[in-house]
Amino acid sequence: MALATKTIPVFSGRQMCYVAAMWRSVLQQAQACTGLPAKFRDVSPNVNVTSYGSRNIHCSPGQFAGHNKWSKVRHIKGPKDQAKSMLFAKYALQIRVAVKEDGPNPDLNSKLDSIISIAKDKGMTKASIEHAVKTAHGNKDKPLVSSQADIQGPGGACILVDVVTDASKQTRDQLRKLCKTHGGVYGSKVRHAFERKGVIMVSSDLDMDRAEEVAIEAGAEDVEQVVDEDDMEVIQFICDPADLQNVQEKLAELQCETKSSSVEYIPTQTLPLTGDLLEQASTLVRELSNRDDVLKVYHNIEA
């Protein structure tokens, strides 16, 4: 008896997940069938299915968490004593951006409603939240402007920075100086090193087998267990940005509590750094993250 081989066509993320699930089912049945030769009974069900298109789709329970490119990005945190105040500053910035995009009414602005809910849970005061909403547009002479900065870090690290400021030239000059101080180059084009993805974090109440099933049902491209900014384990679902709202609604129907959802930039490949280069690159990322006018820092430094 021989297994026929055939070239696999390129599928969408959802299709690949279904193919993987069906393939695992066949293999598991083969394992249970003692009448088959040993080489078929011993086939592992932990099959990692890879699309030959533009992205990898990971759909096996044994290799789901911690084995894809999204799980390899190094988690770089600032000093503990700065964490709380820095966190509230970032929430205030996120609130301002959400208000600018879709208005100040949380009932009509789902992004704003989500950020306010998270900020409240973290202990941000009602007065601080209201102040962020009121000051979202800045003043008429100095409106808030959103932009993105490309930075080449030490060792060739790619760093992408979301900036919101009412003093664009001053911010650019300060970022350029900061990069020079820490071995980076401001203005190097690195956007090509990232892909835009929807990212949804849910409470870690699922084991990875169930998380995989939920990902398939919700239409997510990938799922993994990660550690969030509070050092808590959460389940992270990755999807196409256009599907973010639909996937989030599906997760809610499946009784998954969303902790956060956003569109982020994920590196297409990670860069391993060691020694002094790793320390320099990590320091640059921390210094960028600590700025009040920086909303988010993305990088490809490998964990």
Image (cartoon, grey):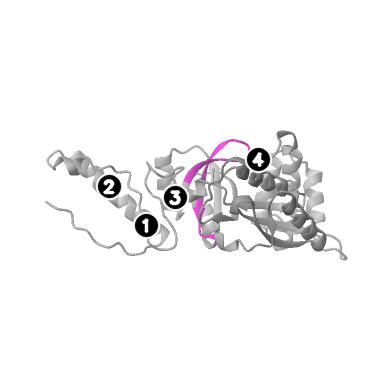
Q: Quadrant of the C terminus?
A: top right
- Whether residue 127 is situated above or below residue 166 in the rendered picture: above
Q: Quadrant of residue 146?
A: bottom right
Cβ atoms at labels 3 and 2 below 8 Å apart: no
Q: Quadrant of residue 229?
A: top right
| Residue ID for mark 3 | 215
Q: Quadrant of residue 53?
A: bottom left
**Label 2 neighbour load within 10 Å: few <14, some 14-19, many 20+:** few
Three-letter code, disc 2: Ser
**Label 1 neighbour load within 10 Å: few <14, some 14-19, many 20+:** many
- Whether residue 253 is situated above or below residue 167 in the rendered picture: above
Between tags 1 and 3, which lies in front? 1
Residue 233 among those drawn in magenta: yes
| Residue ID for mark 4 | 77
| Residue ID for mark 2 | 25
Residue 248: percent from left, percent from top: 53, 53
Which residue occupies 80% across, 45% down?
A: 128
Looking at marks 4 and 1 on the same chain, the residue that comes earlier in the sequence is marked by 1
| Residue ID for mark 1 | 16
Looking at marks 4 and 3 on the same chain, the residue that comes earlier in the sequence is marked by 4
Spatial CA distance of label 3 from label 2 is 17 Å
Looking at marks 3 and 2 on the same chain, the residue that comes earlier in the sequence is marked by 2
Q: SS of the residue at dot 2?
A: helix
Three-letter code, disc 4: Lys
